[in-house]
Image (cartoon, rainbow, N blue to C red):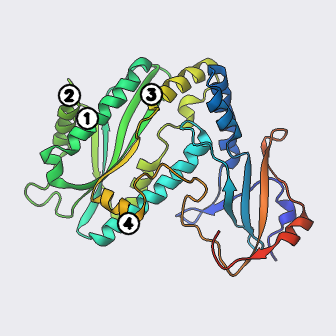
């Protein structure tokens, strides 16, 4: 028996995780949090941001398989505001997909390379120091990747900036996550290895710190590469860090993060990964379309229908806007993905 579309009044969009688990995509919660962010922007007087975030993903249009009920997002408006929880989520999915493609293709073309996962930190800073701290970290990264020791070992890299907020201390913690591509002889061949103590020294020198920063470097086994990619692709700032029960705290953090992250390049490639990314047209994985964020392709040999859901404030959920008779009239077949 086919999927019963008459019961699908509120949006339910499921996917299968890499572990084979059936999970629901969090459209409703992301929209609720986006509305909270819009309210904060309005209180702060950032009216353009408030309007864009409020209007983000109000209408979602899917192509849905008749038999299985599987949905494929076809059209939606996304605001692209950096602190919009909805766009943060979609952007994270896109970055994960794009970086995974680049790393996979790099290993296919250069099987002698393997990935490492690197984390670099600095001490927490106050709100009024965050902008300059991030600028300093960006310049410090440039110095690091141009250091002879780094260039001798690392053949390609992808780095991402993440900023977390410590409510107890009212401080911010900007740090880098990076995937490094090194030769498989790393750790065995002479001159082809940098231990953790050397990484700490290199980062301390590059960042001109007067203390030993916390750093972490670890190998990435073949079956865990996508887990490492997911770590660098996660949100630059989690909504839990800036959306709080206390509106005053929320507004303070939203303003600080909005101002500090403005015009910052949070994700970047280098070396062989940059070359491969250019070949694949994925040089800026955090930019562009947020509708099609992966390679999910709808089967061309099954009947599907066009379904529209709109955010309805009265029920705080996405509600289907098309009646059953319209479903039947609009049922189509396709020989190509949307």
Look at 36% across and 60% down and name the residue there. 278
- The residue under label 3 is 260
> What percent of the width, then of the height, locates residue 219?
28, 55
What is the quadrant of residue 81 in the picture? top right
**Which residue of the protein is positioned furthest toward the front in this rendering?**
48
Inspect this view and state whether residue 180 appears: no
**Which residue of the protein is positioned furthest toward the bottom in this rendering?**
301
Locate the N terminus and report the quarter of the image it occupies: bottom right
Residue 212 lies, with reference to residue 43, above or below; the image says below
Say which label, 2 or 1, has the lower sequence index.
1
Q: Residues within 10 Å of mark 2 (few under 14, many from 20)?
A: few
Inspect this view and state whether residue 8 appears: yes
Res. 149 mark = none
Say which label, 4 or 3, has the lower sequence index.
4
Comparing marks 1 and 4, which lies closer to the viewer?
A: 1
Circle 4/circle 3 CB separation < 8 Å: no
Q: Give the CA distance from mark 3 to mark 2.
A: 21 Å
Number of marks drawn? 4
Q: Give the CA distance from mark 3 to mark 1.
A: 17 Å
Circle 2/circle 1 CB separation < 8 Å: yes
> What percent of the width, then of the height, locates residue 142?
25, 40
- The residue under label 1 is 140
Is 188 displayed left or right of 46 in the figure?
left
Look at 85% across and 54% down and name the residue there. 321
Look at 40% across and 25% down and name the residue there. 131
């Amino acid at each position: 028996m086919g999927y019963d579309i008459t019961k699908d009044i509120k949006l339910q969009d499921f996917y299968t995780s890499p572990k084979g688990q059936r999970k629901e995509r969090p459209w409703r919660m992301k929209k609720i949090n986006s509305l909270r962010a819009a309210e904060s922007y309005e209180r702060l007087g950032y009216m353009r941001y408030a309007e864009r975030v409020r209007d983000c993903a109000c209408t979602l249009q899917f192509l849905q398989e008749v038999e299985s009920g599987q949905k494929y997002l076809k059209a939606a408006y996304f605001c692209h505001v950096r602190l919009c929880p909805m766009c943060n989520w979609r952007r994270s999915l896109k970055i994960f997909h794009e970086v995974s493609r680049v790393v996979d293709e790099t290993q296919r073309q250069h099987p002698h390379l393997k990935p490492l996962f690197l984390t670099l930190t600095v001490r927490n800073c106050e709100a009024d120091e965050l902008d300059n701290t991030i600028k300093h970290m960006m310049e410090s990264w440039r110095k690091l990747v141009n250091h002879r020791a780094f260039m001798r070992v690392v053949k390609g890299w992808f780095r991402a900036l993440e900023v977390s907020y410590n409510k107890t201390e009212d401080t911010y913690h900007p740090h880098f996550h990076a995937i490094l591509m090194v030769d498989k002889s790393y750790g065995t061949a002479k001159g082809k290895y940098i231990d953790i103590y050397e990484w700490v020294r290199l980062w301390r020198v590059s960042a001109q710190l007067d203390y030993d920063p916390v750093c972490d470097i670890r190998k990435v086994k073949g079956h865990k590469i996508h887990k490492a990619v997911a770590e660098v692709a996660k949100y630059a700032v989690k909504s839990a860090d800036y959306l709080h029960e206390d509106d005053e705290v929320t507004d303070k953090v939203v303003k600080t993060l909005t101002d500090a992250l403005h015009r910052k390049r949070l994700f970047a490639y280098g070396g062989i990964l940059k070359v491969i990314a250019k070949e694949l047209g994925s040089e800026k994985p955090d930019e562009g379309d947020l509708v099609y964020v992966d390679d999910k392709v709808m089967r061309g040999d099954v009947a599907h229908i066009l379904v529209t859901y709109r955010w309805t404030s009265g029920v705080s959920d996405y509600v289907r806007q098309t009646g059953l008779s319209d479903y039947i009239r609009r049922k189509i077949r396709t020989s190509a993905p949307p």
